[in-house]
Amino acid sequence: MSINQLVYVSQASRKMSEEDLRAIHATARSNNEPIDVTGSLFYNGGWFLQVLEGPAPTLAALYKKIELDPRHKNSRILYNEPASFRTFPRWNMNMTNLDDRQADKYDELVEVIDAARGNRKIGSASPAVTLLKIFKA
Ligand SMILES: Cc1cc2nc3c(=O)[nH]c(=O)nc-3n(C[C@H](O)[C@H](O)[C@H](O)COP(=O)(O)O)c2cc1C
């Protein structure tokens, strides 16, 4: 089945605790699994960035729901295009809290950015460049 990749950034409505993030992550994982959505969610203390991968109509409906979530605001789609393969095939939702400042997490993000910049996985430089600007320490 053909899939799209959708990338958006949003502003957290308030500072998220570990518990808040765990709750979002748990909901995302269990809801995304049956609808064949994979992806990754980054949080850096003030902003969320999420990559969602799945059938286009599924993503449209899911994004509509996520956008209305009061835990964040000013959500803006950076990228929404067909993709030939998934960047996060093993993750119904991966979660990276950049507040933790764990080196391996940064490496992971850099990998995603590199893939996007190299037009390999996410498929366009523009979301990656924006991503880089927002998420650099
Ligand atoms: C930053 C952020 C990312 C989210 N990502 C997802 C997601 O990938 N999938 C999902 O189902 N819900 C996600 N949610 C939660 C939804 O907004 C919503 O609360 C949830 O889908 C409702 O699930 P329920 O109908 O099972 O209660 C996210 C929320 C936030 C704030």
Image (cartoon, rainbow, N blue to C red):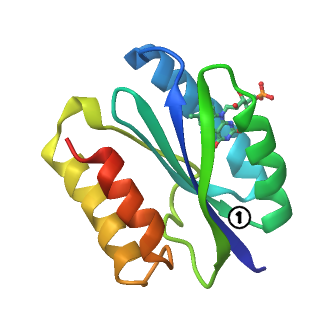
**SS at mark 1?**
strand
Residue at 74%, 46% in the rendered image: 63
Above or below — where is 88 with respect to 10?
Answer: below
Percent of width and height locating residue 125: 42, 75
- Quarter residue 36 falls in: bottom right
Residue type for callout 1: Gly
> Label 1: how many residues lie within 10 Å, few (<14), some (14-19) or many (20+)?
many
For the C terminus, the image quarter is: top left
Residue at 17%, 39% in the rendered image: 102
**Residue lying furthest left:** 103
Percent of width and height locating residue 4: 69, 71
State how many labels appear: 1
Q: Nearer the viewer, residue 70 or 84?
A: 70
Q: Is residue 21 left or right of residue 64?
A: left
Percent of width and height locating residue 119: 43, 84
The residue under label 1 is 54
For the N terminus, the image quarter is: bottom right
Q: Is mark 1 within 8 Å of ligand 1?
A: no
Above or below — where is 23 with respect to 118?
Answer: above
- Quarter residue 109 falls in: bottom left
Q: Nearer the viewer, residue 104 or 134?
A: 134
Q: Is residue 66 left or right of residue 135?
A: right
Q: Taking the image as four quarters, which one is ligand 1 found in?
A: top right
Above or below — where is 42 with respect to 112?
Answer: above
